[in-house]
Amino acid sequence: MRIKICGITNLEDALCAIKNGADALGFVFYEKSPRYITPKKALEIVKQLPPFVEKVGLFVNSTCFEINSTCKKAHMSLAQIHFEAEDVLFEGLEYPYLKVTRATSKEDIEQYSDEYRIVDAFVESYGGEGKRVDMSWFEDVDCSKIILAGGLNAQNIEELKHFNFYGFDLSSGVEKEKGKKDCKKIEEFMQKVLI
């Protein structure tokens, strides 16, 4: 089970997530988000991280050039493409990437079914609102390449384990406020996942 803690804005939260077993950290390069971080600030955090941690840059409505440039400046290891994009954008990316499906129906979760991908609930703000996908949509679906996002926390994670998702991607479920994590909530979530 892989875990990504998204919306990292400071070193303290990053180190808490890693200490408790997170595999990846997400940095939001979308200026309209309350969790937005500049590439320069993200780099300051990344430079102080231990090895073997995936650094994921989240992008919304960005060009191929913007994504490549930001990933390079901030030393990201993976780009998370949180918007519908043409094939030409993906072909021009110089970094590995994950596509995100903002699901509004059961059919949506089958999108990109041959790839590892993130499935999130559709919200106008592109995530981080704690909204959950209808879990009945995943019954009888191969979830082995799906990273589930949206509305995840220590209270509901037990009921999701049987779907055998590749991983979980969470943000608001482990926050004190938007952009500031709660280390106790991260610890509780990770303990429930790793049991």
Image (cartoon, rainbow, N blue to C red):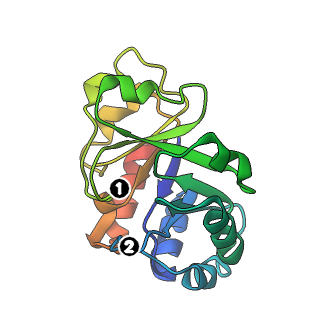
Query: How far from the left and from the top, in percent, is residue 29?
Result: 50, 70
Assign the C terminus to one quadrant of the image: top left
Left or right: where does residue 6 sit relative to residue 53? left
- Disc 1 residue type (three-letter): Tyr
Query: How far from the left and from the top, in percent, is residue 113?
Result: 54, 26
Give the mark nearest the N terminus, 2 or 1. 2
What separation in Å lies between label 2 and label 1 (alpha carbons)?
Answer: 12 Å
Q: Residue furthest top?
A: 140
Q: Residue furthest right?
A: 94
Evaluate whether residue 76 shows in this view. no
Q: Which residue is mark 1?
A: 126
Left or right: where does residue 22 sit relative to residue 95? left
- Disc 2 residue type (three-letter): Arg
**10 Å neighbourhood of mark 1: few (<14), some, or many (≥20)?**
some
Pointers 2 and 1 in contact (C-beta within 8 Å): no
Query: How far from the left and from the top, in percent, is residue 84?
Result: 47, 45
Q: Residue at x 29, y 28 (%)?
A: 105
**10 Å neighbourhood of mark 2: few (<14), some, or many (≥20)?**
many
Left or right: where does residue 88 sit relative to residue 150? right
Q: Secondary structure at mark 1?
A: loop
Q: Residue at x 30, y 61 (%)?
A: 172
Number of the front mark, 2 or 1: 1
130 w.r.t. 175: above or below: above
62 w.r.t. 86: above or below: below
Corner quadrant of residue 108: top left
Please tell me which residue lies in front, 139 or 61: 61
Evaluate whether residue 174 shows in this view. yes
Q: Which residue is mark 2?
A: 35
Please tell me which residue lies in front, 166 or 122: 122
Query: How far from the left and from the top, in percent, is residue 5?
Result: 46, 60
Q: Residue at x 28, y 34 (%)?
A: 104
Q: Secondary structure at mark 2?
A: loop
